[in-house]
Image (cartoon, rainbow, N blue to C red):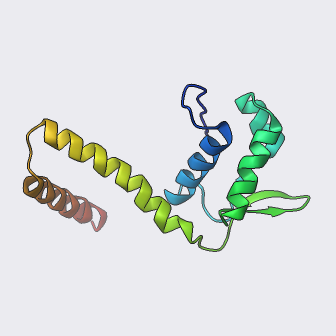
Amino acid sequence: MHIQISSDDGTPIYQQIVAQIKYMVATGRLAAGDEVPPIRTLAERLVINPNTVARAYLELERAGIVTKRHGSGTYVSQNRCPLARREKLKILSKRVDTLLVEAIHLDIGLDELVNLLKERHETLQSLVTQ
């Protein structure tokens, strides 16, 4: 599991950790049952206070993303998290915004962009089913 933090971001470090773990769960990089690094290990790796990691894990636990197993560690929740779909849409919304801005700069209209998306989707689907 690779997490990067930025002190220039303006976002509290614990929130950066929460957002990145949510992203990894939403994209399948962390699957149900996967263990997240112990608090001290992640804190040492990121060179931050262990309390910051503990706060991030607490937020993730409250959101149902991870569960603690006392004496065993912290794991991605086995239950489908109610936030997972919202998180996925949030991730895609950011990418769609970027795509739309690029399309505007390239003078590509919405209809043309939608047609391109449909074409690319069909191409990818045909590759997956082969």
Residue 3 coordinates in the image, percent (x, y): 61, 38
The quadrant of the rendering that contains the N terminus is: top right
Q: Which residue sits at x=57%, y=48%?
A: 19
Residue 1 shows in this picture: no
Task: Please name whichever residue, 88 or 120, is drawn nearer the observer in this view of the structure.
Answer: 88
Q: Which residue is drawn at 55% across and 52% down?
A: 24
User: How many numbered circles are shown?
Assistant: 0
Q: Which residue is drawn at 82% across and 41% down?
A: 51
The residue lying at 61 percent from left, 26 percent from top is 7
Q: In this view, does 56 lie to the left or right of 30?
A: right
Looking at the picture, tell me which residue is in the foreground, 50 or 41.
50
Q: Where is residue 125 in the image (x, y as percent from the top left)?
A: 25, 65
- Residue at the far front: name it: 10
Is residue 49 shown to the viewer in this render? Answer: yes
Q: Is residue 17 left or right of residue 48?
A: left
Image quadrant assignment for residue 4: top right
Q: In this view, does 109 lie above or below 16?
A: below
**Residue 64, above or below 90:** below
Where's the C terminus, which quadrant?
A: bottom left
Q: Where is residue 53 in the image (x, y as percent from the top left)?
A: 75, 43
Q: Where is residue 122 in the image (x, y as percent from the top left)?
A: 19, 64
User: Is 53 displayed left or right of 120 in the figure?
Assistant: right
63 sits left or right of 48 in the view: left
Which quarter of the figure has residue 102? top left
The image quarter containing residue 65 is bottom right
